[in-house]
Amino acid sequence: MTAHALAGALADDARRRIFAAIVLGATSATAVAQRVDLPARVVLTGIRRLTDAGLVTGADGALAVDEASLRAAVRDSRPPDDAEPAADPVLRTFLRAGVLVSLPAQPSRRRVLLTHIAERSFEPGTRYPERAVDDALKPWCAGGGSDHATLRRYLIDERLLTREHGIYQRL
């Protein structure tokens, strides 16, 4: 489980309430439904999503928090200790372990960040279909700081990529 998947699993209010009930000792769907005052269908769907995300186990019909999975998510999301910080203060501010934290509001800072991303994601002169562009940008967005479509749009707006008939190219 990644930190991004963890955040996604707990992004919904009902799932947070269901998770909290399990953390506080509810061991069955019925007990969870009573504590959170939600319809059984919502509770069952929430439990399934939390289980699929690796937050909850249902061993022997008894719900419990999967603490080992949570610890692993925290451990795996830490940047390596030997990671060299970027020389540019804009990159240090808006990138963590090669993942976009957020997009700068100031156009000059956003340009620095987008130039960095374009140079590391695309070869000049190479033609890329939209799917390849999306695949190249998704890892930058794994931290939830933005989404790949927004990033792609900014790269085009800043003329770091061109688009013609669904084919993209870095100048």
Image: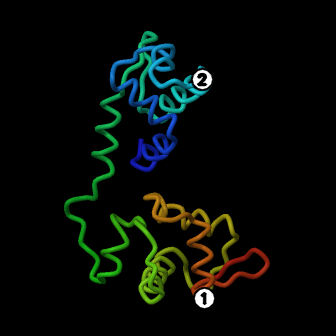
Point out the residue furthest to the front here.
37
User: What amino acid type should be assigned to the residue bearing mark 1?
Assistant: Arg
User: Residue 78, position in %: x, y?
Assistant: 28, 54
Query: In the rendered view of the protein, which quadrant contains the N terminus?
Result: top left
Residue, x 66% and y 74% (percent of image)?
128
Q: Nearer the viewer, mark 2 or mark 1?
A: 2
Residue, x 54% and y 62% (percent of image)?
138
User: Residue 58, position in %: x, y?
Assistant: 44, 18
Give the residue number, with chain letter if any, for mark 2.
39
Q: Name above or below for residue 65 compared with residue 7.
A: above
N-terminal-most mark, 2 or 1: 2
Residue 28 falls left or right of residue 94: right
Query: In the rendered view of the protein, which quadrant contains the C terminus?
Result: bottom right
The residues bearing labels 2 and 1 have C-alpha atoms spaced at a distance of 50 Å
Q: In which quarter of the image is residue 160?
A: bottom right
Q: Quadrant of residue 66?
A: top left
Q: In which quarter of the image is residue 43?
A: top right
Give the residue number, with chain letter if any, for mark 1.
159
User: What amino acid type should be assigned to the residue bearing mark 2?
Assistant: Pro
Q: Name above or below for residue 38 compared with residue 123.
A: above
Q: Name above or below for residue 4 compared with residue 97.
A: above
Residue, x 45% and y 64% (percent of image)?
145
Residue 36 falls left or right of residue 125: left
Q: Nearer the viewer, residue 171 or 87?
A: 87
Label drawn at residue 31: none
The colouring scheme, among rainbow, by chain, secondary structure or one colour, is rainbow
Residue, x 58% and y 79% (percent of image)?
154
Q: Are circles 2 and 1 on residues that touch, CB within 8 Å?
A: no
